Image (tube, helix red, strand yellow):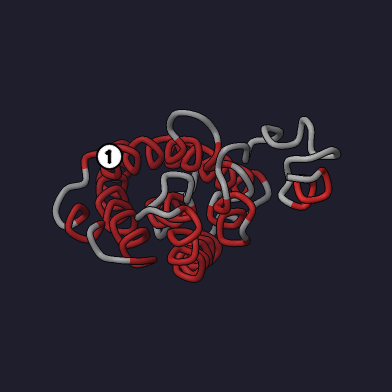
Amino acid sequence: MTEDRKEEAGRGPGREGRDEAGPAAGMGPFASSWAGIMGSFFGVGLLPLFPGTWASAVAAGMYGLMLAEGWAGHWQVCAAAAAFAVLALASGSAAERHAGRKDPREFVLDEFAGFFLTVALQPCYCVAAGIAGFAAFRLFDVVKPFPCRRLERLTGAPGILLDDLAAGVYANLTLRVALHIFN
C-alpha cells in the first residue's frame, strides 16, 4: 500500500499516536458517533469498570448541584428524569447499532433517567435522599427484580431504558418508605 493510501486509511504519517489517544480509544464507531457521545453522557460511560455506577454517581452529583442551587423541586427533578428518558429513547437504538451489541455498557443515559426517577416526587429533597436514592437505585438496577429483567430483553432503546425505569420505581418506593420512617 502506498503512503497516500495508508494515510487515507488512517494508518500513515500524521496518524501516529492518535489511534489510542483519549477515553474513546478502542471503542470504535460507538464513541465517535452522536449516539455514543450522547449515550455515554460525554464520556462518563467510558470510565473503567462500572460505568452504570459512575453514571449514577454523576447523576447524584447533578442532583446535589440542583439542591445547592435551589432547583430541586418536584417539577425540576421530574423534568430531569423525563429529559434523560427521552434522550435515551432517541439515541439508544443508534447506540446499539454503533456498538454492534445489545444494551452497550457504555450507554448510560438510562442510569441518569433511573436515578432521577428514584428521587422524583419524594417528601423531601435533601442530601440524605440523594445518597440513599443512589444506593437504592444501584441495588435494584443490579438485582433486577421482576419485571426489570424481562424489560431488559426488549429490543432497541426500550430494552435499554425500561429496566432502569422499573428499577427506579422500586428504588423510589423504597426511598419514600425510608424517608417516611427516618424523617
Q: Residue furthest left?
A: 146
Residue 172 position (above or below residue 139): below
Residue at the image position 43 percent from the left and 41 percent from the top: 52
Asked whether residue 74 appears in the rendered view, the answer is: no
Q: Front-most of 131 and 140?
A: 140
Residue at the image position 36 percent from the left and 66 percent from the top: 156
Residue 101 position (above or below residue 17): below
Q: Is residue 39 left or right of residue 157?
A: right
Q: Amino acid at mark 1?
A: Val
Q: Front-most of 4 and 96?
A: 4
Residue at the image position 55 percent from the left and 52 percent from the top: 30
Q: Residue furthest front?
A: 1
Q: Quadrant of the N terminus?
A: top right
Q: Quadrant of residue 25?
A: top right
Asked whether residue 111 appears in the rendered view, the answer is: yes
Q: Position of residue 47 (x, y in %)?
A: 55, 34
Residue 57 position (above or below residue 40): above
Residue at the image position 41 percent from the left and 49 percent from the top: 104
Q: Position of residue 181 (x, y in %)?
A: 26, 40
Q: Front-most of 117 and 101?
A: 101
Which residue is label 1 attached to?
Answer: 142
Q: Position of residue 37 (x, y in %)?
A: 61, 54
